[in-house]
Amino acid sequence: MPVQVDNRLSGAAAIDHLTPSSSSSSRRLVKGNEALALGAIAGGVECFFGYPITPQNEVPELLSDLMPRLGRVFLQAESEVASINMVYGAAAAGHRAMTSSSSPGISLMMEGLSYIAGARLPCVVINVMRGGPGLGNIAPSQADYFQACKGGGHGDYRCIVLAPWNVQEMFEFPRMAFEIAERYRMPVMILADAVLGSMLEPATVPDEFPPAVHRPADWACTGRGARSHKNVVNSLFLSADELERHNLLLQRTYLDAQAEIRFDTRFTDDAELGLVAFGAAARVALSCVRQLRAAGQRVGLFRPQTLFPFPAEALRRATAGAKRLVVFELNAGQMVEDVRLTINGAKPVEFFGRMGGVIPSPEELAEFVTRQLAGDSSPKRAMATRTEEACHG
């Protein structure tokens, strides 16, 4: 069954005191990218391979200090292409392996990620998104939704995609990602952005990080040893029938992964308009909801925490009483397609978005939502920011 999570805390741990004598947890202050690194360590990452790129550099920076001290492997590769293939090798040997990058760097990893998914290997990939396409800028964006959720490389593969919205989840999700990746033998991608990566918030994390415990898998390529056979991990199937059977197994796995669906709802019980947003955009959306509620408007928020598998049934249930939905994203409109597929014409689904690193204020979003509450569904209004800003500068 889908799991509903209501995360009301914010933030992650401080870096200054990682090895006190106790194994307790403390509520401290830290940056989002550093929380990702600490969450990976708490999750038992054994090997990290990466290459620098803004705005995620604090992730490898902190891991480069902590991993060797904890008896784990940190390696700065010569490129993103090398990084993802090193992850492939370490994962094939049964180790908890991870890489992190930002949008252009993740694009370079797509071939390797397709190989990893095709070989049914667990790993964790962190994408701290930035503006694009091309080099774009280092400002926050959510324009990598399609790439992450629909399979950015070749073939019919998917990654489980987790979308944190505060620094607490930036710590919790990497730890959870390793467990999920191993449960289904598939990659898990954490989709953050430049805002979440650079913000400071308080949160609760362990004060002490013990050495990673290696968990050997029966499918891992570790040599024959005492076995009568040698494990082989690859994604090459020369027979069409054999490749189809393998693809059907992958698709079955993706269906099974629906058990990992997670979401968060706020004020949806009586909402006549539902806002749908993920990640940093959901923070703006929640402020907007609170402002409109204070003004007497019944507006609620639905926040997917898993972008794939998408919480379709949960969205339908949570917004059953709403007359219309507004999807808010920091892109030109990507998750809105999954929302429209989910709602299937049962009610209007409008889109509001900003691109290029522009983050609208809660008041700007509230103005748009207020027009929707009044029944304004003209295409010009529904795509106001996307079109008018582009045309008029």
Image (cartoon, rainbow, N blue to C red):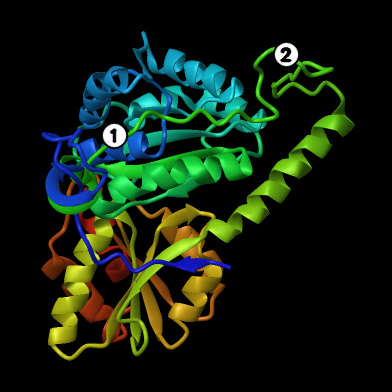
Quarter-of-image position of residue 227: top right
Q: How many marks?
A: 2
* Sequence-first disc among 1 and 2: 1
At x 22% / y 69%, what residue is drawn?
286
Please tell me which residue is depicted at 31% across the width and 85% down the height of the picture.
Answer: 375
Counting from the top left corner in percent of width and height, residue 44 is at: 42, 34
As drawn, is 146 to the left or to the right of 286? right
Q: Is residue 391 visible?
A: no
Quarter of the N terminus within the rendering: bottom right
Quadrant in the rendering for residue 267 = bottom left
Q: Is residue 98 left or right of residue 102?
A: right
Decide: is 230 above or below 197. above
Q: Is residue 9 visible?
A: yes
What number is the disc on residue 214? none
Which residue is at 47% across, 84% downward? 320
Foreground residue among 68 and 10? 68
Q: Secondary structure at mark 1?
A: helix
Q: Which residue is mark 2?
A: 225
SS at mark 2 in the image: loop
Q: Which residue is mark 1?
A: 37
Relative height, residue 360 to residue 222 (above, below): below
Position in image of residue 266 (x %, y %): 31, 76
Q: Residue furthest top?
A: 78
How many angstroms separate mark 1 from mark 2 (CA)? Answer: 34 Å
Which-is-in-front pick, marks 1 and 2? 2
Q: Is residue 234 above or below residue 357?
A: above
The one nearer the camera, 100 or 344, is: 100
Q: Quadrant of residue 89?
A: top right
